[in-house]
Amino acid sequence: MSLTKRSWAEPFKIKMVELLKMTTPEQREKAIKEAGYNTFLLKSEDVYIDLLTDSGTSAMSDQQWSGLMLGDEAYAGSKNFYTLEKAVKKFYGYKHLIPTHQGRGAENILSQVMIKKGDIVPGNMYFTTTRLHQELAGGTFVDVIIDEAHDSENLHPFKGNIDLNKLQALIKKHGAKKIPYVCVAVTVNLAGGQPVSMQNLKELRALTQEHGIKIMLDMTRIAENAYFIQQHEKGYAKKSIAAIVKEICSYTDGATFSGKKDALVNIGGFLAVNDQDIFEEASNLVVVYEGLHTYGGLAGRDMEAMAIGIEESVQDEHMKARIGQVLYLGEKMQEAEIPIVLPIGGHGIFIDAKRFLPHLKQDQFPAQTLAAALYIDSGVRTMERGIVSAGRNAKTGDHYYPKLELVRLTIPRRVYTQAHMDVIAESVERVYQDRKKIRGLKMVYEPKYLRFFQARFSKL
Ligand SMILES: *Cc1c(COP(=O)(O)O)cnc(C)c1O
């Protein structure tokens, strides 16, 4: 027998485990009913495999846990700040670091320092908190992602790319002075974890330089983006994730970062910039919102764990297993002909609920319905990204009807095994087999803001 396929396995072994409560379908039926068919309102202890988010849900390594013991909890000039500063310089190349309690803290500071009332901030698809901070600072977000990103079946390998023609038109229309920076997310969360190519970044750098516009990265999942460049972009197959990460940063002027994703910690973030003036203003402002510029709302121990996590996140073996696990789950679903967003992205699988439950109208909440059905089947918790998340038009009072009606299965890093992935895929398949029996939902309670978190539903 010739061995053509060689399997990969996780580059770690398990030292400590967290026991999970096993529930029966009857218990889950009751729990989801009590939660108003909203997975956000389930108690975590009633969940078997939790795919609600990859944010702050990673497993830390023994090195990171021992880093916690090295916490220097001095108010000013903590040792751990300097360790983190060194890591940011070494792995990302930015000159100045300002720690923040998490990513949105950095977004707030950056937006306030750089955006003036009436400014335009182009970006590759919005992220909820990023856009809100840009708006609160008086700016207007404009989406300049390539059109392919909005099509769940388009196989473009770098669906996160910026459409330079759209950007050029925007510069022409408003003038470069109105555009403080382009906000580039790597990878693009709301497009399904889709990466940006290095070529696109280089071209963007050339165009923005011509006009004196800065580039600020949302580098929350930069190592995941680097993996896609290594795998799919010409000339990068032999480069390390670490080298690619640093090259990405080299085309930009600064970044906001949520440590809760790539960097394998449960809390933390930062703002990093090269420009001395921006740094000075930002380190002044951080005192108002987060804390002194050498801790920014974090304990010393948190900064230590994040510094170690950054180094672990750019290891090739780590990233191969991280994305490998997501691909493994995605490929199982493809084999079962489950409609999912393609190409498979970096941090999770997105099921196309419109194609999964074609007999439901969009205002019967197909993705919300499917998330509840999956929970009842196996105790797997997923999240709606469709009409409920999109909210209502403030003027007309009608629902927004987004093109993409998705259920997101986000994979925490280093937390679940391949056997868990099998259980998830089998549960999705089982629900798919019985999909014709699934009835929709009606909304019985609707909060005013970000309704997906707290809305309640009942069965139709
Ligand atoms: C999570 C996230 C943020 C915000 O970071 P927090 O740490 O949750 O505040 C910003 N951008 C992207 C792309 C994210 O995924």
Image: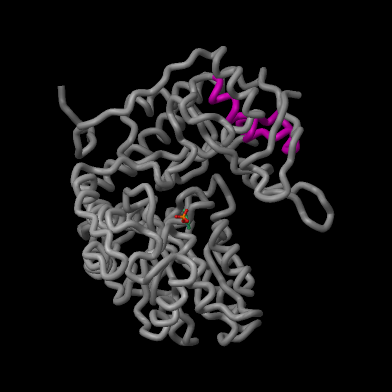
The image quadrant where one finds the N terminus is top left
Residue at horizontal 51%, vertical 79%? 114
Is 275 drawn above or below residue 109 in the view shown?
below
Residue 219 visible in the picture:
no
* Residue furthest to the right: 396
Q: Is residue 283 above or below residue 445?
A: below
Q: Inspect this view and state whether residue 254 appears.
A: yes
Give residue 130's position: percent from left, percent from top. Answer: 54, 62
Q: Is residue 2 left or right of residue 117?
A: left
Q: Is residue 194 above or below residue 428?
A: below
Dominant secondary structure, magenta: helix
Residue at the spot x=40%, y=33% of the render? 329
Q: Name the colouring of the figure.
A: one colour
- Outermost residue to the left: 1
Where in the figure is residue 354, as x and y percent of width and height? Answer: 65, 36
In this image, 388 relative to 81: left or right? right
- In the foreground, 124 or 233: 124
Q: Tell me the magenta residue range.
A: 355-376
- Counting from the top left corner in percent of width and height, residue 138 is at 64, 74
Quadrant where the C terminus is found in the figure: top right
Residue 133 position by quadrant: bottom right
- Give the tally of numbered discs: 0
* Residue 47 is inside the magenta segment: no
Residue at 45%, 46% in the rendered image: 343
Q: Is residue 368 magenta?
A: yes
Q: 73 or 261, which is in the foreground?
A: 73
Query: Foreground residue, 328 or 386?
Result: 386
- Estimate the x, y position of residue 4 in percent, counting from the top left: 20, 31
